[in-house]
Image (cartoon, rainbow, N blue to C red):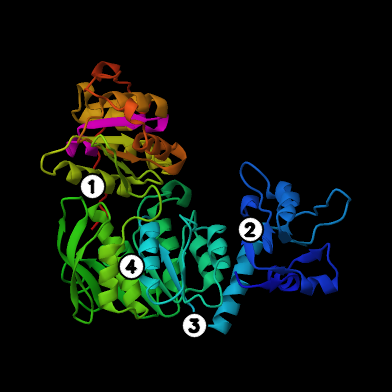
Amino acid sequence: MIELSAAEVTQAVAGTLMGADDESAQSIRVSSATTDSREVVAGTLFLAKPGETTDGHNFVPSAFETGATLALVERQITDANGALYPSVLVDDVVLAMGRLAAFIIEKLRGAGEITVIGITGSAGKTTTKDLLAGIFATAGKTVAPVGSFNGEVGVPLTVFRAEYDTRYLVIEMGADGLGHIEYLANIVKPDVGAILKVGTAHAGEFGGVDNIEKTKGELAEGVSQALALNDDDYRVRRMISRSSVPTIYFGVGESNHDGGVQPRVSATNLVTGATGCPEFTLHFPDGQSFAIASRLIGEHHVYNLLAAATLAYQVGIETSVIAEKLNELGATSRWRMERTEREDGVTVINDAYNANPESMAAALRALTQLGRQEPPRRTWAVLGAMLELGDASAEEHDKLGRLAVRMNISKLIAIGAEAKPIYNAAHLEGSWGNEATWVETNDQALEILRSELAPGDVVLFKSSNAAKVKDLGDQVAQDAPENHATETRTASWLSAGDFVNPVNSDFGAKTTPDDTQE
């Protein structure tokens, strides 16, 4: 973080400085910022953000004990002697974080040659961000989000990590409703941006896919220099009408959907390698082509690779460097197709940080591809609920259960009440006996897996983050050898006779494709 005085922080957030006089307003300096009191070091600005389970104001005293020099607060906090801690009083800490981040962006732009890159989309943001961080690091100091810091708190925290010598600032932008991407874009004012996909993630919160499209498209209106759009998603492709900057499409295949009017970064000869990773020929608008053999598991990652290549190309990174890094970089952030090879020969794929219908289908396809290796491998799908789907939840979980059967997944375990429609639909589609089961808890699923996983099996864990299936995936990946099955046994499975009809009488009816899809 660039060093700021208490006076500058107060000015930036339009707050009131407490517990400090005019002289102290200049002498108190901050050089880092955090919402986590455990991360406080000397010179930290402690952000006392109220949380879902705890209130940051409760940790102000301990933050000052460990080195904080200033706090951002919504109410006055005093020490044991009744003296005010040096703090800036605001109405809303989260909004103040956004104001401070915007202030810092302006100072960075005034002092150096920083390029701000924004990424949004219903899926793939974090992986694309990680790829870009690796590519840009070859050309200058790069700051990118930790994990999936992509909202009204995460974006400012990412900005706060930038310094005057930062050359590239990568910003991941998530949203829960209309106006959220616009808000984030107004904070960071991205020079270039990419929109990856419009899917059904959070459709319940947005009020439908049309509103998701409107929200993601806010980035197209917010970039100042260049835009990258997924040419293979018609909702993304048409966002070009919302932008006035040079645009490059990216997609699979040789030609644009618009007849070749816009330049395009493309992938041809796409196949899935023996390790389940995409391999293809990467083409740039300048005519150069490179062979790519990615280390990311799942053919769906081709779009993340293309998006990263397009953005890097737009900011001037050498194409040979882009290709080299795409061949080199694997998964960085946790629980995104994270692969663990157990010593007993079981492969664990933990992709349970988040889930929506599109990413679930992509993960199942990747699992199927891994199972087709020589010799063929038995595949397990351990699935939790997809949350925030609103009224479409039952239908989408139904589709998922049917899809697992159609893909010939060997074993299916659905976990939790909201995931039961996956199991029910699998039976309706034609699964039987010990192919599919439903359990209430992770512990019950663990019992089955410990009993029945065998050398050579591939097991996928996938759910929304709140379903906690990622924790089960970690447990299975790290399970002690003495817990591994030495011979195949059959645990307690639900059978077809245990099928529970859903309350919704329409549930289980064959679903038809969305007629708006291209």
Rounded to the nearest whole Å, what is the CA distance between mark 4 and mark 3?
21 Å
Q: Which amino acid does label 1 sit on?
A: Ala
- Type of amino acid at the residue the image marks with label 3: Glu
* SS at badge 1: helix
Look at the numbered disc 3 and give the secondary structure of its residue: loop
Q: Residues within 10 Å of mark 4 (few under 14, many from 20)?
A: many
Q: Which of 177 and 326 is in front in this view?
A: 326
Q: Name the mark nearer the viewer: 3 or 2.
A: 3
**Residue 469 occupies quadrant:** top left
Residue that numbered label 4 is attached to: 308
Instruction: Look at 89% across and 50% down and name the residue there.
Output: 81
Task: Find numbered disc 4 in the image and state the secondary structure of the residue it sits on.
Answer: helix
Q: What residue type is labelled 2?
A: Val
What's the residue at 35%, 34% (across, down)?
A: 476
- The numbered dot on residue 113 is 3
User: Which of the two labelled residues, at mark 3 and mark 2, occupies the earlier sequence position?
Assistant: 2
Please give the label number shown on residue 230: none
In the displayed orientation, state which residue is furthest to the top. 497
**In the rendered structure, does residue 109 fall within the stretch colored magenta?**
no
Query: Whole-percent x and y of residue 449?
Result: 31, 28
For the residues labelled 3 and 1, the Cα–Cα distance comes to 40 Å
Mark 1, other Cα within 10 Å: few <14 / some 14–19 / many ≥20: many
Magenta-colored span:
402-421
| Residue 164 drawn at (x, y percent) | 56, 77
